[in-house]
Image (cartoon, grey):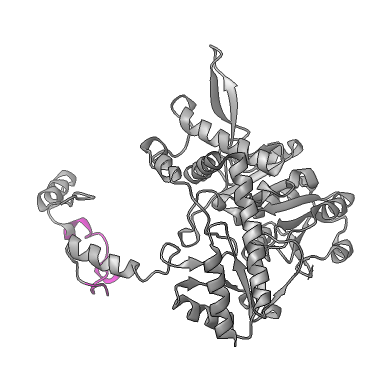
């Protein structure tokens, strides 16, 4: 039998006790008063053999409703996309799988180059000048962007569109609380940011304006006028962008964004029940010295050979505390590598085709729902997701769908009271015509 670990024997235990000079385990803890020691027994099951334990865990795991055995139309920030087989092969190689902090460039060239390639591809996709080595996820990347804007402008207010992912919105608020920064929500109108409302809210205390592209409802925001209004008030324009959508949409950097962030989960990273994922962070040149986290640069050694090093680190661990702009030091190197491998495998044309299929199949789903008598709200240009109105509670509807092997859409009523009985339906490139039609038919039968 293959053992994943070697258990400690009684002989091992006695040898350790002898080495530290005590006879028993009880003697080891005798300095701790009896009255504060735990005297009972833990409320856990008796130990099982490895074979019995593995069987029980497998039975528990089989209860999960995953996207391998169910058809998923659940998105809301985490998506069921095509993942090239080569991704897992590369990231499972020991030199990447076990690598952590590349502080010693002379022995970390492979890891550093992988990060450099990730930075390069993100910068090209977003149309920004420079990107960092990655962030924990899209939500924390957005919050860091807000903090950067406040620090750079020395202003104390952030305007966040009501169409930004509600969880991202909450993370921004949490970061802002510690910095005494005011967070104000820009109302939505017809599923996109209300431009007139923005004009009424922005002032000389606004550090930045935050929008999502495409937004939480799948609608494609018109970034240029939002950027112009922000810059007229001398604030920073921050965009949280789906990098897959940038395969066909105009990059935020071409539309006035000062900071573009997002989550690279769409490229080669499994849903994994919500994480871990991989955030990205890209900026214009004027902000490069305030970027949180790590930045890998390309250089040459004394013999003129290409090499890679860490550079422009903004954490107090690396520079004077009073000059630090963030306490983020680490990065999602392994998952950034996964995204880099996926983007490389897809190539420019493959990425464009993948993005186009998300648009085409979402449009097919929209037409199918409307033909079945459903109302699809928000009629603007969209990507990946649509909002469908139902006659019943969406959570209850989803319980019925899961019995048919379908993971339904996100219940918008959970976070938007005005959208009770509305489902956010995600359609990615791997969904088939038959699967979409089955979803519409099952929802139609329940909706009757």
Indicate the position of residue 55 as horizontal and vertical percent values.
Answer: 23, 65
Indicate the position of residue 5 as horizontal and vertical percent values.
Answer: 22, 49
Indicate the position of residue 180 as horizontal and vertical percent values.
Answer: 71, 59
Residue at 42% in and 39% down? 90
Q: Is residue 44 magenta?
A: yes
Give the residue furthest to the top. 303
150 left or right of 74 in image: right
Indicate the position of residue 267 as horizontal and vertical percent values.
Answer: 54, 49
Q: Is residue 419 visible?
A: yes
Give the residue furthest to the bottom. 448
34 left or right of 301 in image: left
Residue at 53% in and 73% down? 438
Residue range (magenta)? 26-45
Snapshot quadrant of residue 217: bottom right
* Foreground pick, 202 / 191: 191
Q: Is residue 13 magenta?
A: no
Quarter of the image with the C terminus is bottom right
What number of labels is visible? 0
**Magenta span: helix, strand or loop, mainly?**
loop
Snapshot quadrant of residue 254: top right
164 left or right of 438 in image: right
Give the residue furthest to the left. 11
* Foreground pick, 319 / 275: 275
Q: Is residue 326 visible?
A: no
* Foreground pick, 105 / 448: 448
């Amino acid at each position: 039998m293959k053992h994943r670990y070697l258990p400690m024997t009684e002989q091992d235990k006695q040898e350790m006790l002898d080495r530290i000079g005590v006879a028993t385990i009880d003697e080891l803890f005798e300095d701790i008063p009896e009255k504060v020691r735990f005297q009972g027994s833990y409320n856990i099951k008796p130990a099982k053999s490895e074979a019995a334990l593995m069987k029980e865990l497998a039975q528990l795991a089989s209860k999960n409703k995953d996207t391998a055995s169910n058809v998923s139309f659940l998105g809301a920030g985490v998506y069921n996309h095509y993942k090239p087989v080569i991704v897992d092969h590369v990231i499972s190689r020991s030199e990447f799988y076990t690598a952590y902090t590349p502080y010693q460039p002379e022995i970390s060239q492979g890891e550093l180059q992988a990060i450099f390639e990730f930075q390069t591809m993100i910068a090209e996709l977003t149309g920004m000048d420079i990107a960092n080595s990655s962030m924990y996820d899209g939500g924390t990347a957005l919050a860091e962007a807000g903090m950067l804007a406040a620090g750079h402008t020395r202003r104390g207010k952030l305007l966040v569109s009501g169409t930004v992912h509600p969880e991202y919105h909450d993370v921004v608020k949490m970061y802002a609380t510690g910095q005494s920064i005011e967070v104000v929500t820009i109302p939505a109108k017809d599923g996109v940011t209300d431009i007139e409302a923005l004009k009424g809210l922005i002032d000389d205390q606004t550090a930045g304006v935050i929008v999502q592209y495409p937004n939480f409802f799948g609608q494609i925001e018109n970034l240029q006028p939002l950027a112009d209004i922000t810059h007229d008030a001398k604030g920073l324009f921050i965009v949280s962008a789906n990098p897959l959508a940038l395969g066909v949409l105009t990059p935020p950097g071409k539309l006035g964004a000062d900071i573009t962030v997002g989550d690279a989960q769409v490229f080669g990273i499994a849903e994994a029940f919500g994480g871990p994922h991989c955030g990205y962070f890209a900026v214009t040149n004027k902000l490069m010295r305030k970027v949180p986290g790590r930045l890998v640069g390309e250089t040459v050694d004394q013999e003129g050979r290409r090499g890679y090093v860490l550079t422009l680190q903004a954490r107090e661990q690396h520079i004077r505390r009073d000059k630090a702009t963030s306490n983020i030091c680490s990065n999602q190197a392994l998952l950034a590598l996964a995204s880099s491998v996926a983007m490389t495998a897809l190539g420019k044309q493959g990425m464009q085709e993948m993005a186009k299929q998300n648009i085409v199949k979402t449009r097919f789903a929209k037409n199918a729902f409307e033909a079945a008598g459903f109302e699809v709200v928000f009629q603007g240009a969209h990507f990946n997701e649509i909002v469908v109105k139902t006659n019943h509670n969406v959570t209850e509807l989803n319980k019925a769908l899961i019995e048919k092997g379908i993971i339904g859409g996100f219940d918008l009523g959970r976070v938007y009271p005005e959208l009770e009985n509305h489902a956010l339906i995600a359609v990615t490139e791997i969904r088939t015509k038959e699967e979409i039609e089955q979803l519409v038919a099952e929802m139609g039968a329940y909706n009757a």
